[in-house]
Amino acid sequence: MGGGRGGAVSDEGEATERVADEMPDDLRAVVAEIEAEAQAKRDSGEYPPELERELQALFRDLSPERLNEHDFEAVLERAERASLIDIHAPIEDQRAVAAKAKAAVQKLILWYMDYVVAQLSTFAGATTRSVRLLGDRVASVEERLESLRRRLPVESDEIGGMVPPAPIPDVWQPRVADLVAAGATGRVLHVDAVDGAFVAVLRDRGVDAYGVTAVPGVDTPDLRRGETLDHLHTVAPGGLAALVLSGTADRLPRPAKLALAERAVDVLAPGGVLVLVGVTPDAWDAEGSPVERDLAGGRPFHAETWQAVLEHQGMQGVTIEAGEGTYLVTGTRPA
């Protein structure tokens, strides 16, 4: 079992070498001087082996593990080092009688401990090895996903620029403004605000409104550049008094639409109002531009589908107002 401890020292040495390779030259020189001085004191006997082992164990126990808790390799190396159990406890003692007693006890129980520790080390080694193999497979999958992401971007600026922006139809703007202004006592967000024209309408009515747009080159205090779901995930739960969804809600793929509905309910405060402006599938197919239909991630939901999805998420009083080729779906988060 003594070889196990040597393996631990070897692993620590390899880890130290990897860290040293990443150091700047001046820092590497300072570390080399410290190591040389420590080795000289160790050779002279000024640092007893027992003291060095105690210091190493204390450092491992007190080192801030949280600094590398997200480094898979570092955590796994620590587990592998811990799986190597040294049964040769230190028996050095300045008192001769105590040292002899420790040596006698060690001889008496060594055969038993060796049997138990061999099984524990085998199990721990197999466990850490299986975790490393699993980690390698996960890393391989992540690399393949990253490669696919580069080849098949979900939504690039170039593609987004080819899809015409979809502002709220003029026929719906007064109605949406009335719905929002009537109950909004806090922050209001308009998602897919395009050039921010409707945000300006809301602010003229005294509403604390801002918008998110995918239009390049737009970034003001009242209009921020970003994608719908990405921005909603930065909003605190219950942080909005009202939310207006338009444009992007029609073009998202079906899974993203469902995620949008769930997140929209989360960001609304109790009593908050959700207003969704949508295009009917028939109007999308008949009147939408070929570019938008072909490049969009998905096609619009029927109003009844949005109603069912929002009610499933817990929204109350979900109603539909139909227009010519468009519709409004409104609802309120329970107080």
Image (cartoon, grey):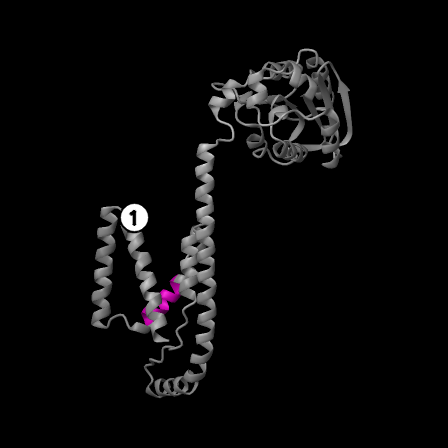
Q: Look at the numbered disc 1 and give the secondary structure of its residue.
A: loop
Residue 210 rendering spot, x and y as whole percentages:
59, 22
Instruction: In this rendered view, identify the residue nearer to me: 34 or 197.
Output: 197
Q: The residue under label 1 is which amino acid type? A: Glu
Q: Tell me if residue 76 comes above or below residue 233 in the rendering.
A: below
Residue for point 45% across, 62% down: 128
Instruction: Indicate left or right for 240 with 136 as reference.
Output: right
Instruction: In this rendered view, identify the residue nearer to me: 36 or 250.
Output: 250
Q: Quadrant of residue 209?
A: top right
Residue for point 42% across, 65% down: 82
Asked whether residue 189 appears in the rendered view, the answer is: no
Instruction: In this rendered view, identify the residue nearer to me: 194 or 139.
Output: 139
> Does 57 appear in magenta?
yes
Q: Which residue is mark 1?
A: 22
Q: Quadrant of residue 313?
A: top right
Residue for point 37% across, 76% down: 1
Residue 147 rendering spot, x and y as whole percentages:
43, 38
Q: Which residues are magenta?
A: 51-59
Could you classify mark 1 by the number of other residues whose Cα lies within 10 Å: few (under 14), some (14-19), or many (20 or more)?
A: few
Instruction: Indicate left or right for 168 with 102 as reference.
Output: right
Instruction: Indicate left or right for 51 with 116 as reference.
Output: left
Q: Quadrant of residue 36?
A: bottom left
From the image, give the main secondary structure of the stretch colored magenta: helix
Q: Tell me if residue 22 comes above or below residue 288 in the rendering.
A: below
